[in-house]
Structure formats: C-alpha cells, structure tokens
Amino acid sequence: MKKILIVNGFQPNAFSEGKLNASLVEKAKQQFEANNFEVKTTIISEDYTIEEEVDKHIWADIIVLQTPVNWMGITWGYKKYIDEVFTAGMTGKLCLYDGRNEENPEINYGTGGSLNGSKYMLSLTFNAPNGAFNNEDEYLFQGKSVDDLFFPQHVNFRFLGMTALPTFVCYDVWKNPTIKNDFIRFEDHLNRHIINS
C-alpha cells in the first residue's frame, strides 16, 4: 500500500479563498483512497506541529504539493513551512546536512538526503496561460517552462533525496478558467503517474 502525503500550500489572501486548491486536494485524497492508498494531509494555513510534519515526510512514499503560484513561486506560508520542517529534519531525519565532508567540501553539495526512494509531485494553479511557457516569443518567461520557473522547489525536494514525478498545472484560472477539464486532466495525471505506475 502506497503512502501519500498531500500538502495544501494555499495561504489566505485578498484575491482568493483557496477553493480550487482545496478541491484539488480533496479530489486527490478521494482518488488515492479509492485505490487503497493510505493518505495524510496537511493544510499549511492551519496549525501543524513541526516534528509531526517531519515524521509525515519520512512516512510518505510520495508527497504531493498542491499550491497556487504567488508571484512566480510558492506561497509565503509554504516557504515558512519548508523553513521550519525541512530545517528540523536536517540532522538526519530528512537529510544529513548538505552531504559534503570536510576532506573535500567543494563537491557533493546537496547529496545528504535521507528520503531516497521517495517521490514528489508539484500540482500548481496559475493565473498565467499555458502559452506563456515554452515560447521564446513570450515576454515574461522567455521560453522557460513551468519546471524551469519552479527549479528552486525541485531543488528543495532533491536536497532531501527525493525524485520528481511530472508536474501538473491548472493554467489561467482567473481570466480563462477551464476547471471542469482541469479536474479531468488531474484525475488522468494521478492515474498515469502515481496510481497505475
């Protein structure tokens, strides 16, 4: 039985109540449980215990981060969560510091992860349209992909020794939403990359 931790990285703000991200978390939870996966969830805007979150990361085979994109990155609440939880796990539970040794400190930075064999998946909700990415003619991202934009988050998980699953994205959720289709695509994505893999 696979063990899944779903982290809802939504942080309340003046523009959104977080309904889409909460609905995606619930959809994933139901889909995993229907396939006999054991599921735990964390909502970062609610109270959590740092040591319990460290233990959840150790427990999980797969971590799904469900988060809106705020100013081209994760929410400030999820950044706080990382700072607290990942730092608390640095003495060996999540990683053994940065993996280097004193004999040759110039190499192997970031190889101290303790969660080898575990996987993670980013699931993101964007105001940006799909066409803004992977297109050198587009002004803002200059041909970069979503995963290029989220490279720092990928590196955080790699620092723990984890391996990426393909990223899922809901694009243009404010100005041109296609929520019904997004949920169909999300279900298919979870089936292909987690449930039936």
Image (cartoon, rainbow, N blue to C red):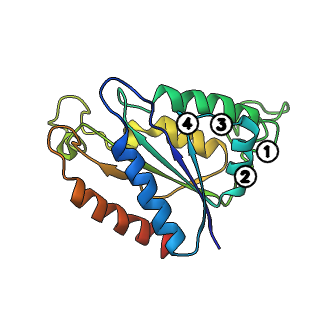
Q: Earlier in the sequence, mark 3 or mark 2?
A: 3
Residue carrying label 1: 93
Whole-number angstrom distance, CA of label 3 to CA of label 4: 7 Å
Callout 2 secondary element = helix
Marks 4 and 1: which is nearer the front?
4
Residue carrying label 4: 44
Whether residue 179 is visible to the viewer of this picture, yes or no, is yes
Check contact, mark 2 vs mark 1: CB within 8 A.
Answer: yes
Callout 1 secondary element = loop
In the image, is 28 to the left or to the right of 15?
Answer: right
Marks 1 and 3: which is nearer the front?
3
Of 160 and 178, which appears nearest the observer?
178
Callout 4 amino acid: Ile
Whole-number angstrom distance, CA of label 1 to CA of label 3: 18 Å
Marks 2 and 4: which is nearer the front?
4
Check contact, mark 3 vs mark 2: CB within 8 A.
Answer: no
Q: Position of residue 92 (x, y in %)?
A: 81, 42
Q: Earlier in the sequence, mark 1 or mark 3?
A: 3
Check contact, mark 3 vs mark 4: CB within 8 A.
Answer: yes
Residue carrying label 3: 48
Residue carrying label 2: 58
Residue at (52, 75) in percent of width and height? 35
